[in-house]
Amino acid sequence: MNGEEPFYKKPRVLLLLIVILASIAAMTVSYENGEVKVGSNLNYGLDLQGGSWLQLQLQGAIVQVSADESKIIQSEFQRLLNDPSIKVEETTLNSVTFTTTKQTTQKIIDSFGFGKSTITQAPDGGTRVSLQISREYSIQKYLENNLDAEIRMIPGNILTFEIRKAVTEDELNALLKPVDGKVNSFKAGVSSDTREETKKILESKLNNLGMKEIPIRTVGDDYILIDLAGVDITTAKDIAAKPGKFEIRIQVNGNVTEHVLYGTEITPGLPEKQTGDQWAVTFTLSDAGAAVLRDAAIQYGAVTNPEAHELIMLLDEKEVYSAPLSPELARNIQSVPVKSLSATTGVGDEGQRRANELQIHLRAGALPVEVDVIGAGEVSAELGSRFKSQVLIAGLIALILVAIVVSLRYKQPNIVIPMLSTSFSEVIIILGFTVLVGFQLDLPTIAGIIAVIGTGIDHLIIITDEVLAGGAMPPDKVYRSRLTKAFAIIFSAAATVLVAMSPLLIMGFGALRGFAVITIVGVLIGVFIARPAYAEVIQGMLVEDTGKKFVDE
Amino acid sequence: MNLINEKMIDEYVKKFNFKQMLILPVILLIVSLLILAYTSYTTRTPEGLGAPVKLGMEFQGGTAITFDSSKTPEQLKEEFSAYPVVQAREYGGGDQKLLQFGPMTESQLSDVINKINSEYSNPGQITQMGEVVSKSLQRQTLNAILFSFIGMAIVVFIVFRVFVPSIAVVISAFADIAFAAAMMNVFGIVLSLGTVAALLMLIGYSVDTDILLTTRLLKRKGELSDKIKDAMKTGMTMTLTTLAALIALFVVSSGSYLVSSFTRIDIIRDISVVLIFGLIADMVNTWMTNVGILKWYMEKTGKTETRVEKPKKRRQAA
């Protein structure tokens, strides 16, 4: 003993003991509503508790395009006014002037949404139209009309648009060719704003269904991962992926419609019976939503002629409801934006059925972009629990086999027991870690734990053989220098494992991230906490127990 | 019973010169590379050579579903012939079957799921992988393995700072991975997320014993063959404990071949089987390849005896 304090009072051993106790506490004790509870706090992943997961890709594109605004105005108004002889006369920085042989009014021109117009009579008959429009806006409007999609300008030095619809670069080039334009840069995907918006909507949708704390993760800009515990794959897809885009459009004339707002601006109410057995669904618009509805109603003339400018509700570009503004609403909306609206669905049982259906549509919609299910999976609850018990059995058998091998080699319980206990304590600390950081324990994570145990035992063997070279515990000074050498090997070996695992941390789709994180954390816990303590323990155990034997020899 | 037979190690170290030690590993490496090249050649497409290992569903795109059925795989293939069945096979013993489909539309997929749910019992796992993801995963996996290997090589060179011993470790690790990958082809194990994890793990694992060996030989005093013997004793114990644990995992995760209530756990099975092959190769490559190269290097540079500057260094350290 050399008059030193016993091994169990050494700082490294005490540190290990404290960390083990803290891990056990983290795993078993929880504090909720002022009550301390004891029970397992481990979070199991989907593959151990049953459920399904979805990987969603958000459909869209971020593009930089150029085009000639006079060509755009020419081609768009040829179409809108049905006049092949449109001639652009003058283009300045903020305006485009053209003549048409048709007679038209400012109201009609303004209703197309190409900016504020000034109308004069052309000298040789027909109309001369001057539009206050920038090149950027003309391109945006052109894309919006021809792709039938929402286009957002992304702020920045270079003119960049986000197209909230699946489109290819070739399609876009073909579209821009008639207006002397082309795609300068193209990236499939969506902006981070759109991604966050989609994520938020999905979250609220799941919350509405009573599924709290559903982990929704975003990977890169274009992918969203959702884990739905206890839900089968078909239901999961129905919930998350199927309901697409809810949109209200307004009829401009005939079959031509214009976008008004998306489901994001709508808070659906409940189906209710109104006077005269009439069923309806009430809904509320946000301030912004109410404002755009009013603008659209005035701009396209729905306030004066509601019957010719119906409001159309679409879910995933399919019409689910369409009706004109009621005369009363048409009057009111002229003076103030209206936030509370109701959509009538008819009388009797049929009316009620349609009201219920419409309400589901109103609630279900709202994703700003379409999503594709690019990956999905399901593990049934029964299989999950089988996995759980079987993994436990596998771990126990592995531990027993390791114990046998180590005992055959070292034969002394003074070495074997500390070795196995150290290894086991590493498992406990890793499990404690997963609880503290809210990490889910799934099959890849467990594989990571097993991998760490494998390297852990290896390193304990290195320590043991290095310090016991020659068969006996050496004096403290020699022991220290040998231990330094053992740790030189261990740190080098650990460094290679850390480096080898690190690419997985950044590999996409989070596929093996859990495995990598656990391996890395486990190796760090091992080399900095558990293995140094082991070195102290065997020194203490062997000096204490075998000291006498060596005197005899 | 002794785990390590010291006499055998003794004889091996004394009897074999480095050339004899290198024969077996060189043959193994050549055979491994030939197997990988052959797989790559047979899976070639008009665009170029295929992957050196067979790609699993995760890397190809498609859908895999497991369930219980007493029908033979052939009957199931026939029954689902309206859908793009890639393969039907036994899965983990018992009545379990696995059906794998190529890319399908969402409605086709839900038809398949409904059919299985209503007509068969115990639908267990469904995995669906889009082509976009799987293509991207393929590329990322290749990068991950490359970065991982290069990173490991850099660490090894930083640790030893001498060319021959460092490159010996890197060669041994490469031979381990090549052998493990070749054995995947031989035993029909496809590249999955689990096997990728195992290959990366192997990069880290397999150099453990090499680092131990090289450190002991370069930095310790004493007779070369004694140092090799000591290192071998430690290293063999390390590999054997790990192998014991992996065999336990492999058996339990393989399904009901041994215990009827067990079910197959793909990811654990994939990881354990690849690591088992890798560690078998590691025994050969550490104690033949790496020892062989180091023996040759130390005999050539006359470093078989204690290095002169060694005691000085130790005093500084102490």
Image (spheres, coloured by chain):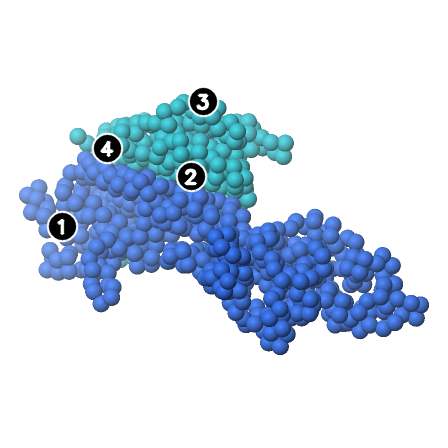
Chain colours: A blue, B cyan
CB within 8 Å, label 3 to label 2: no
Q: Quadrant of residue B95?
A: top left
Label 4 close to label 3 by CB (< 8 Å):
no
- The answer to whether marks 3 and 2 sit on the same chain is yes
Q: Viewed as shown, does residue A411 lie left or right of B273?
A: left
Query: What label does residue B74 carry, if any?
Result: 3
Tell if the residue under mark 2 belongs to the same chain as the one under mark 1: no
Query: Residue A382: horizontal and vertical position, in percent?
Result: 31, 40
Please indicate, yes or no, whether residue A453 appears anywhere in the rendered image: yes
Query: Pointer 4: what residue?
Result: B4
Q: Which chain is indicated by disc 1?
A: A
| Badge 3 density bin: few <14, some 14–19, many ≥20, Cα 10 Å | few
Instruction: Please give the name of the residue rendered at 52% of the width and 41% of the height, measured from the top-left corner.
Output: B106
Q: What SS does tag 1 mark?
A: helix
Residue at 30%, 36% in the rendered image: B249
Residue picked out by circle 2: B126
Q: Secondary structure at mark 2?
A: strand
Which amino acid type is marked by label 1?
A: Met
Crowd tier of the residue under label 1, counting other residues whose Cα lies within 10 Å: few below 14, some 14–19, many 20 or above: some
Of labels 2 and 4, earlier in sequence is 4
Residue B275 appears left or right of A77: left
Camera-nearest residue between B40 and A103? A103
Mark 3 or mark 4, which is nearer the start of the sequence?
4
Q: Residue at x 79, y 54 (%)?
A: A178
Q: At label 4, which amino acid type do we have? A: Ile
Measured Cα–Cα span from mark 1 to mark 4: 24 Å
